[in-house]
Image (cartoon, rainbow, N blue to C red):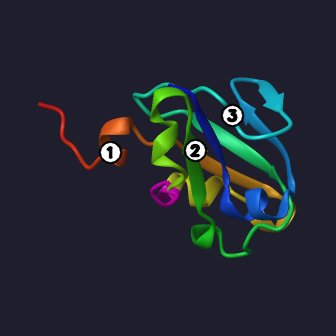
Amino acid sequence: MSLSVAPVEAMASENLAGTDYRMKTTPQGLTALSMAGGAEIQFKGKGFKHETNYNQVVLTPGGVMASLGPVIAPALNDDDVFNSAPMNGHIAYTTPSVMKLLNKEYN
């Protein structure tokens, strides 16, 4: 399963300057992540909302799950809000697990 991740504001306005993940920067959202969640990524760009917790991230499934269409991801957690500086063009985000996205529990 491929997955694109980017802030809603940056995708809508095409203002995403880059996404940092594991010491690598891509000029757009990420295209592959672990389904277990917990990936700490950082978005760089402009047009973010100044109140950090009002920024949203959209997940766009690919491959066999592409028919699901874009999904609004869970809100930024407290650590993400603390590590973000939207006025300076920086949003931190920790990806959720697929189980959390589907509202399922591990047994």
Left or right placement of residue 4 versus residue 89 in this view: left
The residue beneath circle 3 is 30
The amino acid beneath tag 2 is Thr
Crowding near the residue tagged with mark 2, few <14, some 14–19, many ≥20 C-alpha atoms within 10 Å? many
Separation (CA) of disc 2 from disc 3: 10 Å
Residue 55 — which label? none
- N-terminal of the pair, mark 1 or mark 3, is 3
Give the percent coordinates (x, y) of residue 16: 83, 51
- Which residue is pictured at 60% across the width and 73% down the height? 54
Q: Nearer the viewer, residue 64 or 60?
A: 64
The residue beneath circle 1 is 100
Give the percent coordinates (x, y) of residue 74: 45, 56
The residue beneath circle 2 is 60
Left or right placement of residue 55 versus residue 24 in this view: left
Question: Which quadrant of the rendered structure holds the C terminus?
Answer: top left
The amino acid beneath tag 1 is Lys
Of tags 2 and 3, which is closer to the observer? 2
Separation (CA) of disc 1 from disc 2: 16 Å
- N-terminal of the pair, mark 2 or mark 3, is 3
Q: Which residues are magenta?
A: 72-78
Quadrant housing residue 48 = bottom right
- Which residue is pictured at 83% across the width and 58% down the height? 89
Give the percent coordinates (x, y) of residue 61: 53, 38
What secondary structure prevails in the magenta region?
A: loop
Of tags 1 and 2, which is closer to the observer? 2
Identify the secondary structure beneath mark 3. loop
Identify the secondary structure beneath mark 2. strand
The amino acid beneath tag 3 is Leu
